[in-house]
Amino acid sequence: MSGGHGTDDGRGTAAGAATRTATDDGHAGTAPADGGPANATATATDGGHADAAGTRGGRRSDGAREVRPEELRSHQWYGTDGLRSFSHRARTRQLGYLPEEHLGKPVIAILNTWSDINPCHVHLRDRAQAVKRGVWQAGGFPLEFPVSTLSETFQKPTPMLYRNLLAMETEELLRSYPVDGAVLMGGCDKTTPALLMGAASVDLPTVFVPAGPMLPGHWRGETLGSGTDMWKYWDERRAGTIGDCELAELESGLARSPGHCMTMGTASTLTAAAETLGVTVPGASSVPAVDSGHDRMAAASGLRIVELVRQDLRLSRLLTREAYEDAVAAVLALGGSTNAVIHLIAMAGRSGVKLTLDDFDRIARTVPVLANLRPGGKHLMEDFHFAGGMRGFLSRIADVLHLDRPTVSHATLREQLDGALVHDDDVIRERHRPLAAEGGLAVLRGNLCPDGAVIKHVAMEQRFLKHTGPAVVFDDYRTMQRTIDDPALGITADHVLVLRGAGPKGGPGMPEYGMLPIPKYLLEQGVRDMVRISDARMSGTSYGACVLHVAPESHVGGPLALVRTGDTITLDVAARSLHLHVADEELERRGAAWTPPPARYERGYGALYMEQISQADTGCDFEFLARPGTTPDPYAG
Ligand code: FES
């Protein structure tokens, strides 16, 4: 033994470490140490993880039960008498840590989706240091784990193909290592649901650290929004109204800093959903990625997770049906991304909560759209942050929320929202002055989408809310790209563009092809929207009369596979209907003649994906991951 530090008995924890986790808004979480308002967020007993006799853990000064060092999950790796513990302690010394630096302390895994190829997360390597700072100060032992990055921009055919792979990686890493609690670092579109899906399946105390939005874009006096203005100016380019010089300037002005897309796209929608679920520190989701406040938020998350481990407050206490319903309400009132429908259904499934498309449609009728953010509105995420962020925003829809549920920082959401203010009523609208009277998404049904489809009706030309037109059908995306601009197709603004072969299996991975391009010759005539229908998804930064997520998809023989050019289709958003005007007998004849596409993957992850992936209406999870059941912890002795 060197220096008398080689035994297990030096494992006193910094139990009295400061636990105050206020973010910039001054809303502290638990603050028993500084005499602030006590916040008995949860106890081991009501978390359902204490033993039946309630003997687990000691009592804290605020009455909450506290997990003792020998009850930590990591104790199985470090604290027993056997050969393996001896080896684990020796190997941790090999990592350069003194025993008193880590033994008996909560081990906090920081799962970091940083990568050189992911501009939305390129700052997360630095930010992980701030999380570690918080963990050390609270008396924990931080360990960073690099995990897959899902870069929306670069990964093909789409990061959605790999969402479940990151979820699996998250789950298995947390399960197989000596981890007592987790901090998840992500934000670019699929990373948020993937990390939370995996973590929910393990059910440890967990805090999510959102990557934060990038700075607003700028070009020639205009403010540019991620994606939204890229699509807009690309159409101008195709229409011939801007040239190479303008395009090069736009390339420099669109994305000015690290951070995820700063419109209310999929990233902002999902991180806002995470904050609403209660798995971030208050106000976390809108802090700009390069703001010093982002460092402070990361440190606050590190402080907080150690306290959550001591309280044994696990994700299952937070991710309840009430929490998911509140996340749906928030997404709808934000005018958020259609992708949230798929991801929240999948996340809820991992929490044992059955969330359905009908829940979205039902809740949509109870909340107005209050966030004036692109693509449906005017402002960007930095404006939203300084207007009050999610605390201010949620305070405006508090009447539809479940306020008595806990969050990572407060005993109840009600406490978390107490005193929340909105500082700009144009960015976060008042209830009597909404952007739209109902939530931003509608769920459609009909003979073209028996298992449902979605449309973001607040971000489209309103004349298409009810529209009947002849279909122009494309069997796959590449064919569509090759032929869409051919005037010989005779497409008019009243036609309905139909794309198939772009669903969960057909894409594969449901690429964001759903905002089909408008034919160039129509753009030149000034047309900027058309009704488009597909089994694909659409970027959260996109807009237009795009019917998405048609289920079942064409690849498995859904009715979309049977549409022919010239068939008439009616979209009626008010009636929540999508109807193909073809007789049932004719559809049956076409169905009998339909042949499934050949298998795309003979081996590898792709083959597993094709075998396991579910349809859009059930969240596109893998069957073997979504099914109920327990997974044993590994034996670490
Ligand atoms: Fe990463 Fe948009 S590309 S969030």
Image: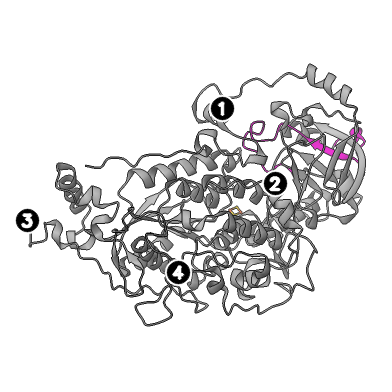
Reading the chain from its start, which is encountered first: label 4 or label 2?
A: 4
Pointer 3 residue: 1
Instruction: Give the class, few, some or many, for how many residues have Cα within 10 Å of label 2's Cα (few <14, many ≥20).
Output: many
How far, Cα to Cα, is label 4 from label 2? 37 Å
Q: Mark 3 touching mark 4, by CB under 8 A?
A: no
Tell us which disc is closer to us: 2 or 1: 2
In the rendered structure, which segment of residues is drawn in magenta? 486-514
Mark 4 CB within 8 Å of ligand 1:
no
In the image, is residue 142 above or below residue 536?
Answer: below
Q: Amino acid at mark 2?
A: Leu
Quarter of the picture containing the C terminus is top left
Q: Amino acid at mark 4?
A: Asp
Reading the chain from its start, which is encountered first: label 1 or label 4?
A: 4
Q: Position of residue 617 (x, y in %)?
A: 67, 41
Secondary structure of the magenta portion, mostly?
loop
Say whether residue 144 is magenta.
no
Q: Residue sitting at 74 percent across and 51 percent down?
A: 361
Q: Amino acid at mark 1?
A: Glu
Reading the chain from its start, which is encountered first: label 2 or label 1?
A: 2
Q: Amino acid at mark 3?
A: Met
Q: Position of residue 565 (x, y in %)?
A: 88, 30
Mark 1 CB within 8 Å of ligand 1:
no
In the image, is residue 278 above or below residue 470?
Answer: below
Tell us which disc is closer to us: 1 or 4: 1
Pointer 4 residue: 295
Q: Is residue 244 visible from the viewing direction of this image? A: no
Pointer 2 residue: 357
Reading the chain from its start, which is encountered first: label 1 or label 3?
A: 3
Pointer 1 residue: 611
How far, Cα to Cα, is label 2 from label 1? 23 Å
Which of the pair 155/163 is nearer the observer? 163
Q: Which mark is residue 382?
A: none
